[in-house]
Amino acid sequence: MSHDFSGYTAQELQSLIDAATKALKEKLESERREYLRQMNELASKAGVRFQIIEDLSKGGGAPSTRRGAKVPAKYQNPHNPAEKWSGRGVKPRWLQAFLAQGRDIKEFEIKT
């Protein structure tokens, strides 16, 4: 199914894209509703309640991008107080260097 779009203006092509996108969304939603109807029918014939799956299918949003709260720093570089580390994740290079020299991590704890 090949079409020659060379005679269209950019605006006409964008209109075609927008219309096709809208038609595709409507078609996919219609098919989804039909599949759910068929599954509901099969489930009821088998004596199974289908409500849970229908409820899950309505969620369909993107996963949350929320992150946890910031954790206060527990360790600080004595040579550069702006460099701090919360104690979570990979140890920063400055701390790794001190630990490689045999120093104890407790030396770098921020006193509160």
Image (spheres, helix red, strand yellow):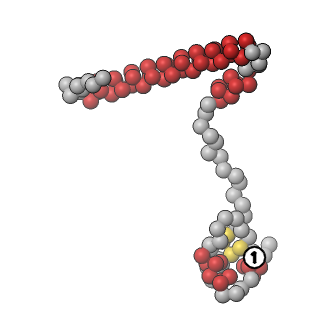
The relative height of residue 27 versus residue 92 in the rendered view (above or below) is: above
Q: Nearer the viewer, residue 98 or 110?
A: 98
Percent across and percent down for residue 12 are 28, 24
Residue 70 seen in the figure: yes
Residue found at x 62% / y 82%:
97
Residue found at x 39% / y 22%:
20
Percent across and percent down for residue 49 are 76, 19
Residue 73 seen in the figure: no
Percent across and percent down for residue 16 are 33, 23
The relative height of residue 106 versus residue 64 in the rendered view (above or below) is: below
Q: Quadrant of residue 53?
A: top right
Residue found at x 65% / y 84%:
100
Q: Nearer the viewer, residue 25 or 53?
A: 53
- Looking at the rendered structure, the kind of residue marked 1 is Glu
Q: Which residue is mark 1?
A: 109
As helix, strand or loop, the secondary structure at mark 1 comes to loop
Q: Quadrant of residue 1?
A: top left
Q: Quadrant of residue 102?
A: bottom right
Percent across and percent down for residue 87 are 71, 68
Total numbered labels: 1
Q: Quadrant of the C terminus?
A: bottom right
Residue found at x 62% / y 45%:
65
The relative height of residue 81 versus residue 33 in the rendered view (above or below) is: below
